[in-house]
Image: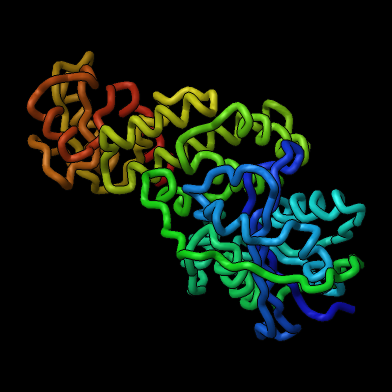
């Protein structure tokens, strides 16, 4: 029997406690069995080391220096967790760090099950992306400042409250740590602004994956790539995370390829990939060790009535291709407009006026062979 739920969030100096990274902020929000918020608590934690990606979490060294070390808040935190069901967004990430912090002090944080709002939102709230912001947007849950432990814990608590009627019994945390006399909490001295650059914006659009625990790895990858850089240390940390999730190289590379493809699809959402977006995609591909060219080619699908345009001298006569397109239910036009679905070119690198106009509008230009495949897909769907 639990006393309700303890929704936690941690900000950390890096991605893996196995690489000696530490908790630098922790928040706990309590919900009772009906989903009512009954209490909340948050403090910065002095890790006695550098703070890692400060541009991401926004915690200053001046604030961290004033904060207690984890040993100073361990008893208070344990009291707020013990007897409650542990909850977090990507629970495995937060749990690994909390278990490592308590283990340094000789205590075992036993959380037999726990609840992950990343999984709950996908299963019960229709969230197609894994990020906390995306899940909150779908569910209509207010989202405060990203990478603030208290704001993220509040948002996760909001997601949990919407799912409680579909959750069965979950074992609570078991943890006993003596409370420290005169334990104190330290808050941030300034608000942390949200990231504005390309990858940070796209993260909330990325879809979930089918691979078991794949979203847990990709959530950590999101954090690592938010600054478009993977240091050797971060690469080692990602390997630690993959090992903790029992992933081998084939599974990791499959996730990396899917991650890049999803980024490219999100970049194509407005109909074109800008030079800056292409540069970012190429950078991410190099960091992940995957091939980029296929991701930069927009996936093309045709529907009945779509407008298509031909340009150049085809291997087969233009009239033959136009007849096939009309028979498949497409509409053939002589000129390119913004409503054109695809341009079929004898050479997709054509510099014809039609091809140049298609590129300006972000319209895919495909070869005869690819168009033949698209016609086959269209016929097969009828």
- Can see residue 266? yes
When the figure is inspected, residue 325 is found, relative to residue 82, above or below; the finding is above
When the figure is inspected, residue 124 is found, relative to residue 314, above or below; the finding is below
Please name whichever residue, 24 or 97, is drawn nearer the observer in this view of the structure: 24
Q: Position of residue 377 (x, y in %)?
A: 41, 37
* Residue 268, quarter of the rendered image: top left
Number of dots carrying numbers: 0
Please name whichever residue, 305 or 222, is drawn nearer the observer in this view of the structure: 222
Q: Position of residue 378 (x, y in %)?
A: 37, 40
Residue drawn at x 85%, y 49% is: 104
* Residue 156, quarter of the rendered image: bottom right
Residue drawn at x 92%, y 52% is: 106
Residue drawn at x 66%, y 85% is: 36
Residue drawn at x 35%, y 42% is: 267
Horizontal arrangement in the rendering, residue 157 relative to residue 227 (left or right): right
Please name whichever residue, 26 or 213, is drawn nearer the observer in this view of the structure: 26
When the figure is inspected, residue 147 is found, relative to residue 7, above or below; the finding is above
Please name whichever residue, 88 or 337, is drawn nearer the observer in this view of the structure: 88
- Can see residue 245? no
Colouring scheme applied when the structure was drawn: rainbow
Horizontal arrangement in the rendering, residue 283 relative to residue 129 (left or right): left
Q: Position of residue 270 (x, y in %)?
A: 28, 48
Quadrant including the N terminus: bottom right
Q: Residue furthest top?
A: 315
Q: Position of residue 23 (x, y in %)?
A: 69, 53
């Amino acid at each position: 029997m639990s006393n309700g739920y303890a929704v936690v969030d941690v900000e950390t100096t890096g991605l893996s406690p196995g690489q000696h990274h530490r908790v630098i902020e922790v928040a706990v929000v309590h919900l009772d069995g009906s989903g009512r918020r009954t209490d909340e608590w948050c403090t910065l934690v002095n890790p006695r080391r550098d703070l890692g990606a400060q541009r991401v979490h926004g915690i200053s060294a001046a604030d961290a220096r004033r904060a207690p070390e984890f040993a100073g808040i361990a008893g208070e935190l344990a009291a707020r967790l013990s007897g409650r069901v542990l909850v977090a967004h990507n629970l495995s990430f937060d749990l690994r760090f909390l278990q490592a912090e308590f283990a340094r002090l000789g205590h075992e944080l036993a959380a037999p099950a726990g609840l992950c709002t990343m999984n709950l939102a996908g299963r019960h709230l229709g969230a197609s992306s894994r990020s906390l912001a995306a899940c909150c947007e779908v569910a209509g849950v207010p989202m405060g400042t990203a990478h603030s432990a208290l704001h993220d814990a509040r948002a996760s608590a909001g997601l949990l409250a919407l799912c409680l009627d579909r959750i069965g019994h979950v074992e609570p945390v078991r943890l006993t740590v003596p409370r420290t006399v005169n334990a104190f909490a330290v808050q941030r001295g300034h608000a942390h602004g949200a990231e504005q650059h390309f990858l940070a914006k796209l993260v909330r659009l990325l879809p979930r994956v089918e691979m078991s625990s794949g979203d847990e790895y990709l959530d950590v990858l999101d954090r690592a790539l938010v600054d478009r850089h993977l240091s050797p240390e971060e690469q080692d940390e990602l390997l630690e995370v993959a090992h903790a999730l029992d992933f081998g190289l084939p599974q990791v590379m499959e996730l990396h390829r899917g991650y890049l493809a999803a980024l490219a699809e999100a970049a194509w959402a407005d109909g074109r990939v800008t030079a800056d977006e292409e540069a970012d995609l190429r950078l991410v591909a190099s960091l992940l060790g995957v091939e980029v060219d296929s991701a930069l080619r927009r996936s093309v699908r045709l529907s009945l009535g779509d407008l298509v345009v031909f340009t150049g001298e085809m291997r087969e006569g233009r009239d033959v291709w136009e007849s096939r397109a009309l028979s498949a239910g497409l509409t053939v036009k002589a000129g390119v407009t913004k409503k054109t679905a695809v341009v079929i070119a004898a050479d997709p690198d054509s510099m014809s006026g039609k091809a140049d106009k298609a590129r300006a509008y972000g319209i895919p230009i495909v070869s005869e062979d690819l168009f033949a495949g698209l016609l086959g897909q269209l016929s097969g769907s009828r």
